[in-house]
Amino acid sequence: MRQESMEQRIRVAVLGRNGRMGSEAVRAVSDAPDMDLVAALGRTDDLSELVRAGAKVVVDLTVPDATRENVRFAVSHGMHAVVGTTGWDDAALAELTAQLAESPGTGVLVAPNFAVGAVLAMKFSELAAAFFDSVEIVELHHPRKLDAPSGTAARTAELVAAAREAAGVAPSPDATESDPRGARGADVSGVHVHSVRLQGLVAHQETLLGNAGEQLSLRHDSFDRVSFMTGVLLGVRSVAEHPGLTHGLDGYMDLGL
Ligand SMILES: NC(=O)C1=CN([C@@H]2O[C@H](COP(=O)(O)OP(=O)(O)OC[C@H]3O[C@@H](n4cnc5c(N)ncnc54)[C@H](OP(=O)(O)O)[C@@H]3O)[C@@H](O)[C@H]2O)C=CC1
Ligand SMILES: O=C(O)C1=N[C@H](C(=O)O)C[C@H](O)C1
């Protein structure tokens, strides 16, 4: 019995151990009763340490410049990966899918956001998208964030745009003729995304949907990075059961939709 429960423990490595997310993940994995933290690497550590440590699941919480190579290395050594780092554009995801086809049985989760409320807010935005004339997204983050728009906002915009296109909804009305300073924000698949960087914030997003005479606001706030850890642990526990690429934590959640 004791031996059985030892075998069921998941051997986890965290990449980005000194970062805001990585340090929180090191804590969460160390505290999880069914996981062993077998490696925690920083920027200057060699990825071969993952092999030496016998990691089964690699959690990547690094930087956009490093994440693709980290995941490529993990998959090429038959390790599953749970990825929270931003920077996964369509080309990178396609390359990863091709690599995974050569490694049947290996799973990778690329999760733009691990917070349960943020995952639901993205899904609710997608569901609501076709029922409103206008939709715009505002994301608000701490000022140390390297990328804009946030991965969550970019993914939300893609999901919203796809839902509107599938339903044959016209683009959001907008009479703007002149915007030399980019005040209308980024255009992500035809959806305007506005990025705020403000001291004191962690991670926040609002999808604004408008019709004549009404507005629906779908807002999520992460006040603390602990909010992401339920999703990180769900990813670690589930990734081996989902071979291939899963884009979005909702792929591991039974949303009944
Ligand atoms: N999916 C989600 O729910 C969430 C995703 N994120 C994303 O996660 C990423 C990390 O965010 P955050 O923790 O705030 O960022 P930080 O800058 O705090 O942390 C990144 C860490 O990665 C380290 N690092 C850089 N390159 C490597 C490498 N090759 N191997 C190992 N470690 C490396 C950095 O080291 P050094 O200190 O030496 O620079 C740093 O400690 C971002 O892309 C962010 O957008 C953030 C929050 C939630
Ligand atoms: O950098 C962050 O902090 C966050 N990054 C992710 C993103 O870009 O969407 C997730 C969350 O918003 C926090």
Image: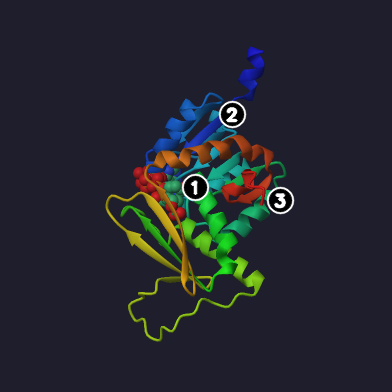
Q: Residue furthest front?
A: 213
Q: Is disc 3 surrounded by few (<14), some (14 to 19) or many (20+) residues within 10 Å?
A: few
Disc 3 residue lies near ligand 1 with CB under 8 A:
no
What distance separates the C-alpha of mark 1 from that of mark 2? 26 Å
Residue at 51% from the left image edge and 45% from the top image edge: 116
Where does the image place residue 139, in percent across and percent down from the top left? Answer: 40, 59
Q: Secondary structure at mark 3?
A: helix
Residue at 52% from the left image edge and 64% from the top image edge: 157
Q: Amino acid at mark 3?
A: Ala
Q: Amino acid at mark 1?
A: Gly
The tag earlier along the polypeptide, 3 or 2, is 2
Q: Residue furthest left?
A: 199
Q: Is residue 68 visible?
A: no
Residue 210 versus residue 115 in the image, above or below: below
Along the line of sight, which residue is nearer the eye, 141 or 46? 141
Residue at 27% from the left image edge and 53% from the top image edge: 199
Disc 1 residue lies near ligand 1 with CB under 8 A:
no
Per the image, the residue denoted by label 2 is 10
Q: Is residue 137 visible?
A: yes
Q: Residue furthest bottom?
A: 177
What distance separates the C-alpha of mark 3 from that of mark 1? 32 Å
Disc number placed over residue 117 in the picture, else none:
1
Q: Amino acid at mark 2?
A: Ile
Residue 237 versus residue 61 in the image, above or below: above
Q: Secondary structure at mark 2?
A: strand
Per the image, the residue denoted by label 3 is 101
Where does the image place residue 210, in percent across and percent down from the top left? Answer: 48, 70
Mark count = 3
